[in-house]
Image (tube, rainbow, N blue to C red):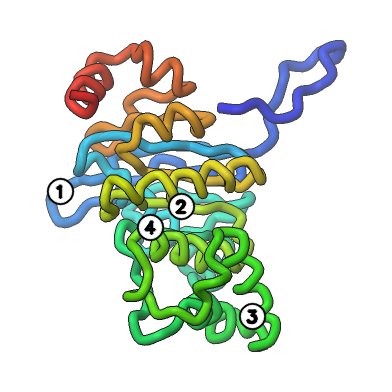
Amino acid sequence: MSPGRLRDPGLQHPPTLDPPLLSVRGVRKAFGDHVVLDGLSLDVRSHQVVVLIGASGSGKSTLLRCIDLLEDVDDGVIELEGQDITDPRLDANAVRARIGMVFQAYNLFPHLRVIDNVTLAPRLVHGTPPEQARADALAVLERVGLAAKAQAFPDELSGGQQQRVAIARALVAKPAVMLLDEVTSALDPELVGEVLSLLTELKSTGLTMVVATHEMGFAREVADEVCFLHEGRVHERGTPAQVLENPREERTREFLRRITG
């Protein structure tokens, strides 16, 4: 993990870290008898990019869905900015307003123009006035390089452009953390690079991200920390150099051998 501010070394106290922006503690999630997350714990600090790797079924997508409150946890706690967001008394929509989620599929409304896809949630969920929502949407579309496509329909865009619209839709609410679930897996190989380049640019702005991916090159270049998930737990974690180049655990080595051919 990236260190936060440390105490004055002259003080007679051990160094402490800033509290994590996102904290997952002992989270368990099962579907029937199938346990997907088995007491998983993970901290993410402000401005950190944490990349989740692991085989299909290791729990990556389920973890992101639990953080976004799309799945209820069976046990454990998830805190965002110090607040227990698994508390059932909370307004889930208000919590999701602080979290940006981008899925494998673009999930754009095909009958709405790009600008309307991006302004829909701010207007209907967050009560943003239409003029402000439009201005915010155009600004974020400019940021992802698609301002010129504001009036286009999704089927007029390439897959890479559609995924960038989906990222813009998540960014427009200025989330505390972005969750990205295999956002290049549905793209043709020649379109993967444009989406990964955008995520690299977003990292440079200090955006906090948790990214599930099979793109090891991206993980190596962008991640502050890589977490290898296996059987619903964080089996190994560390810097990209440590986990991807010199993993300690045999399970991690096996996974990397399979995925890199």
Amino acid type, residue under disc 3 in the picture: Ala
Q: Nearer the viewer, mark 1 or mark 3?
A: 3
Does the image show residue 211?
Answer: yes
Alpha carbon separation for disc pair 1 and 4:
34 Å
Q: Badge 2: few (under 14), some or many (20 or more) residues near its Cα, within 10 Å?
A: many
- Are discs 1 and 3 less than 8 Å apart at CB? no
Position in image of residue 61 (x %, y %): 31, 50
For the point 31% across and 51% down, which residue is it? 62
Residue beneath disc 3: 133
As helix, strand or loop, the secondary structure at mark 3 comes to helix
Residue 34's disc is: 1
Amino acid type, residue under disc 4 in the picture: Gly
Alpha carbon separation for disc pair 2 and 3:
22 Å
Q: Is residue 115 above or below residue 35?
A: below
For the point 56% across and 52% down, which residue is it? 177
Alpha carbon separation for disc pair 1 and 2:
24 Å
Residue 160's disc is: 4
Position in image of residue 134 (x %, y %): 63, 81
Residue beneath disc 2: 179
- Are discs 4 and 2 less than 8 Å apart at CB? no
Question: Which image quadrant for residue 256?
Answer: top left
In-image side of 82 versus 63 (left or right) = right
Alpha carbon separation for disc pair 4 and 2:
18 Å
